[in-house]
Amino acid sequence: MAGPGSSNESLALDEEYGQATARFYDAAYARLPLPQLDGRDVEFYRELAREGAGPVLELGCGTGRVLLQIAALGFPCTGLDASQHMLARTRQKSTFPNLRLVHAPMQSFDLAGERFGLIFSAFRAFQHLYGVADQLACLACVRRHLAPGGRFAFDVFAPRLARMAALEEPETVDLRFGHEGEEIVRHAAVTRDPALQLLDVRFRYERWRDGRVVGNELASFRMRWFWRYELEHLLARAGFREIEIHGDFDRSPVSADSPAFVVVAR
């Protein structure tokens, strides 16, 4: 049996981010009060792209929320994702001739010798690499694709000890939003494995029309949480020598109240 650090431990993201998740993704996450989703992360990554002044690659580009804003600056952009469903949503929204989309996992991609001034992975996408082997494989791919002086940036949530200690969060309604003439009520449940630093999230999208339930759609995904110095050791082991870890997208220092770990490395 494969161990916790093996590459086949990761679930196929094309299954995780299936049709239900991809269809509701933009409408749902636009309503969440997260620092990654109020525009601060977009401006942070746009500024890094300007500073890099070269081609840009996003790993786990999803529906293109951040990448399309960078493509609007005119840089050659590549978006890579393991989910065909998410990439299809990006294609529907994109009108940029300078944007290319690639279906591939972030831990094993090869773009034929291309080099990028900025490679980034927004909104916790790096947390879908569950084992150390996959994480190191991704970072090795990143280093092979960075131009001289190029940078790798990503963000993950900063775990709160009290919440991570709760092994289960029973199903509750966490979000309501409108979508294509229906009201969607999202029910969420979470289980955690502190030994493996893994959490499993299950969503049930309850679809209402004209005052009655017309359907339910299910989605689930897994994430690995990281501690601050774990990230530093991981990046150093992968060969990065200049490592910055901030507590938010304003580059403030990490504190007990930081909502995220925002990483820039080269």
Image (cartoon, grey):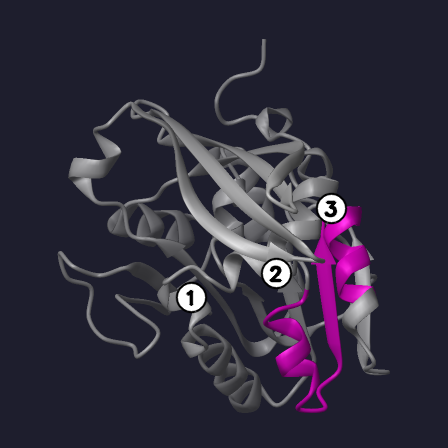
Query: What residue did someone put label 3 on?
Result: 83
How far apart are the alpha carbons under marks 2 and 1?
13 Å
| As drawn, 177 above or below 116 | above
| As drawn, 166 above or below 208 | above
Query: What residue did someone put label 2 on?
Result: 26
Q: Earlier in the sequence, mark 2 or mark 1?
A: 2
Q: Position of residue 223 (x, y in %)?
A: 47, 38
Q: Position of residue 101 (x, y in %)?
A: 80, 64
| Amino acid on which disc 1 is placed | Gln
The residue closer to the viewer here, 117 or 209, is 209
Query: What residue did someone put label 1 on?
Result: 36
Which tag is nearer the camera, tag 2 or tag 3?
2
Label 1 residue SS: helix
How far apart are the alpha carbons under marks 2 and 3?
15 Å
Q: Position of residue 9 (x, y in %)?
A: 58, 25
* Residue positioned most to the right: 97
In the rendered image, residue 86 lying in the magenta stretch gets the answer: yes
Q: Position of residue 233 (x, y in %)?
A: 33, 48
35 relative position to 89: left or right: left
Q: Residue at x 59, y 8 (%)?
A: 1
Give the residues in magenta. Answer: 64-91
